[in-house]
Amino acid sequence: MIEHPKTFFIDIDGTILYHLNDFAKLLDTDDIPPLPDAAEKIGKWHCQGHTIIITTARTESMRARTIKQLDSAGIVYDQLVMGLTSGVRVLINDYKPDTPRKALARNVRRNIDGLTNID
């Protein structure tokens, strides 16, 4: 375990699983290819004691299918938050003035980067 665990909020489509660009296809398959380093990095962070929260604009009615897709891709997580907008997402968080720990944000190119350049 690490001394100061992080909480990772990670989007699904185009970030850790290939974005299919076709909503109907999401409903018809349990297997969506993971993007580069997604399962490996998330698994590593989880084993280190970090909290993994998977986020998505997918509707709550897609929860069972989404869980199958994440499981099939080997993605481990602590929580799955569904029904977010597909627009801009903003993280607002406080920090203690005497510590360097602050909220961070990273953007990745859809269906290209995966988690390759995220540490």
Image (cartoon, rainbow, N blue to C red):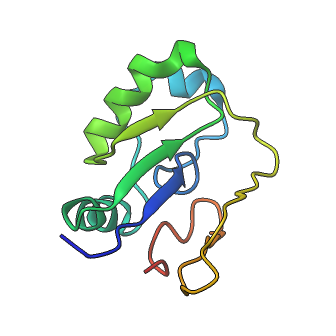
Image position, residue 49 (x, y; %): 24, 62
Res 30 seen here: no
Q: Quadrant of the N terminus?
A: bottom left
Q: Is residue 90 left or right of residue 34?
A: right
- Residue shown at 54% from the left, 57% from the top: 15
Q: Is residue 105 above or below residue 101?
A: above
**Residue 70, visible in the rendered structure:** yes
Please tell me which residue is depicted at 33% across the width and 42% down the height of the picture: 78
Judge from the rendering whether residue 8 lies leftward or rightward of residue 44; answer left or right: right
Give the residue displayed 24% in from the left and 74% down from the top.
Answer: 2
State whether residue 111 is above or below residue 17.
below
Q: Is residue 90 above or below residue 73?
A: below
Q: Position of residue 41 (x, y in %)?
A: 32, 68
Task: Give the quadrant of the C terminus.
Answer: bottom left
Q: Position of residue 56 (x, y in %)?
A: 59, 38
Q: Position of residue 24 (x, y in %)?
A: 60, 21
Quarter of the figure with residue 20 = top right
Q: How many marks?
A: 0
Residue at the far top: name it: 61
Q: Quadrant of residue 22?
A: top right
Could you say which is closer to the camera, residue 81 or residue 65? 81
Q: Residue furthest right?
A: 87
The residue shown at (27%, 76%) is: 3
- Depth check: 47 or 62 in front? 47
